[in-house]
Image (tube, rainbow, N blue to C red):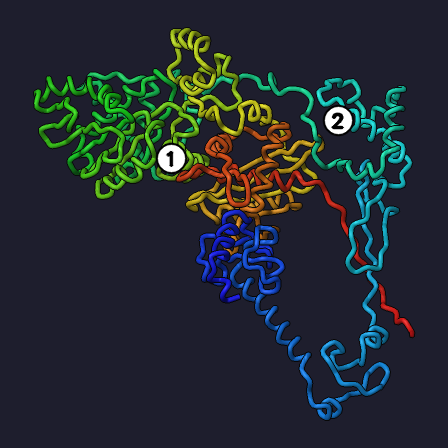
Amino acid sequence: MTSLHHTAEYARWRKLVMLNCEPICIRCGYEVDMTLSGRGPMGPSADHEPPMAITGDISPGLDGSGISHMKCNRQHGGKIGAQRSSASRRGTTTNRSNRQRNQVNCQGCGTLYPPNRKSAGKYCSKDCFDLNRPLAPIWLIQWVYNCVVCGKDCQHNATITTKTETIEPTLNRMICDSQECKAAHPAMLVRDRYRQQNPTSTDNSRRASKYPEMKNRNEKYKIMEQEERKKENLSRSLRSPAALSPFPPRGSVEGKYKPTEPRLHALGFVMPRLETKAPSAVTGSFGGEAADWLTSVFGMELFAWQRYALDRALEHDADMKLVWSAVIITVGRQSGKSWLSRAICMWRLHHGEQFGETQTILHVANKRSTAMEVMRPAGLWATEVYGKKSVKWGNEAAGIELPSGDRWLIHAANDSAGVGYSVSMVFCDEAWKIPQSVISDSIAPTMVMREQPQIYLVSTAGDSQSDLMQSYRQRALDRLDDDEPSTVLLLEWSAPAEADPELVSTWKWGSPEWSDRRETFLAEQWARIEESAFRRQYCNQWVIRSSHWLLDKWWTGTLDPEVRLPESGTWSVAVETDFDGMGHAVAIAAPNLEGLIVVRVTTHRTIAEVDQQLEKIRAEHPSLFIQVTPGYVDRLRQKFDALVGQREAVSATQVLQDLFSRQQLRHDGSQVLQEHFANSKISQRQGGWVLTAPMGRNGVYAARAVMFAVSQAAKAPRSVATIRSRRPTRRHA
């Protein structure tokens, strides 16, 4: 065996095993980490069954080959060596006098015999041992099934066996002794067969009663009933009433929601739909002073919604320091974002004394010309006030520099943006097109040593590939309802996910300054451009890219904010964390009486908040089945029932896709859940296809928590084995 490890045939075989075999240990059954070194005890090693040490095959194929832990492989090899050594010892001749000297009395028949390993030093032969050994208890195993009609336990179906290891028996029927259930069961078989043959039927006239075929039974149903009785083991294919229906529910969800108007401010503008609460530390704002300065000095008149946004962005505490380190402002196209951007940059550029240092403002956009267009009116004004040398229009060092040394710089959003500068404020224009790596790797480190730095992300909604906006918005959404939010301010004017894009009331959500002229313009655009583009640009809705696995009709077809979690049954709860540990999600899934799985999900910042949420859920509904990922072991205080990981994610991904395609899920269309599903993708991993995030991105932990929860909730109730025992009896020879 040792020489075999150094042959070319063995190297070729080992390479084929590592490339083609599943990374599951064929000895212990647990997953093998392929990233570990093959020299370590838990590292991967090539194995074969039967072992090559027995077969002597120096060039085996993939049949019988597999991957195992190095430790398991060596332990199995050690057992083979021990067996060979024992066999060689048993084959050797020994001194007869020693064998006679070591004879003992058999505890069964009393004769003298030389002890051996098989007799365990007590009995002379196996027959004697079998005749006199104590009997094990006789186990009475009773399989109790749920009646498919009323759901009660079927006691008359109990099967008793004396085997300690038994297989669940197959019963010809799964109904109780009630006469009503016996009468209703044939009708249920007919109904299920009819639905399988006519899945697109929309005849709802028979849906009034629980078992309508019992009342209206014609010749067609009688013939079908006779055919059903001829088939064997038909009950094995039946679903329990708590299981999911194999067909989509009847009816449509379209037209179910009434159009709702957005909230209006006292000054008449539309209020943001998503807005971060002001923390308790806020004592005032520089917004009013900034608006007055812009009007008197720069000649800018702001809209009412722009004044409101400026007032929220410049909120300060008792020490006159800004409370928001990041500000996200997102509205529909042509609503006045550029005007507001220019106002913010001009005010900060001229108020360095407010922060006690010279200001350097970095204005970036996906294209340099986009940022230049915002700065151009301010540059023309600065040329008249400070002279031509104060403004630079070239490709290098474009921007405005005041005599005081304060600067407004224009850079393109690339890897070198801001590198070498110390920046007081960063303004990202059309942030949905800017990669997250530009901010996190190049620009964010430039603000470390500045006083009260701020970063502004101003943009229209993008798609699921806008990683920068998705990341910052997700952190703000996680703390949106907290009394003490984080330092990220979110002001978003957007239409709800369930809103109908054809309605004018939906258009108002993304347009803070509404007018008849804008309504006419949007009506023309609605007739010209694609729906997804209209939703993103004018309704300011984050849409899923066209090639996404989750189709729009799947999402809208399972949307129902009015449905509630069932009060009875077991709730399946799943807890998942983000890849960086900065976010946690708690998902609840439970099937209702209609066979639909209702889903709810919440996001949290810390594990302590997860413990509080689980305690709250347990107090509301004690019957829970809680699943967590391995990262929560020894960290959660609340009790959980099972661990889920990559292996369970493979099957859970398939269940999630199936439930969406059959529209048997019901969710409330929450913004967090929509964005997490929009960020997700289905990729191939070692165990199969898994719902995960694209490479280098995060923000799908709520979707994965829902995936684990619905996979558990979709499982049909299994039969329960009741085990009883009685005192053992002894057989006599």
Instruction: Work out whether 669 lies above or below 641.
Output: above
Q: Position of residue 111 (x, y in %)?
A: 84, 86
Instruction: Work out whether 289 lies above or below 116.
Output: above
Residue type at the position of mark 2:
Gln
Query: Where, quadrant-wise, is the C terminus in this rendering?
Result: bottom right
Q: Which residue is mark 1?
A: 472
Whether residue 57 can be seen here: yes
Q: Can you tell which quarter of the image residue 193 is in?
A: top right
Q: Mark 2: few, some, or many residues within 10 Å (few <14, many ≥20)?
A: few
**SS category of the residue bearing label 2:** helix
**Badge 1 or badge 2: first in the primary sequence:** 2
Q: Can you tell which quarter of the image residue 723 is in?
A: bottom right
The residue drawn where x is 17% and y is 28% is 350
> Across the whole image, how many numbered discs are drawn on residues?
2
Residue 196: assigned label: 2
Q: Can you tell which quarter of the image residue 264 is in?
A: top left
| Numbered disc in front, either 1 or 2 | 2
The residue drawn where x is 43% and y is 12% is 529
Q: Position of residue 192 (x, y in %)?
A: 78, 29
The residue drawn where x is 40% and y is 8% is 521
Q: Position of residue 589 (x, y in %)?
A: 61, 38
Q: Position of residue 433 (x, y in %)?
A: 34, 27
Apparent side of residue 316 relative to residue 27 in the rendered image (left or right): left
Q: Mark 1: few, some, or many residues within 10 Å (few <14, many ≥20)?
A: some
Nearest to the observer: residue 703 or residue 636 = 703
Residue 657: assigned label: none
**SS category of the residue bearing label 1:** helix
The residue drawn where x is 45% and y is 23% is 541
Residue type at the position of mark 1:
Tyr
Apparent side of residue 690 relative to residue 340 in the rendered image (left or right): right
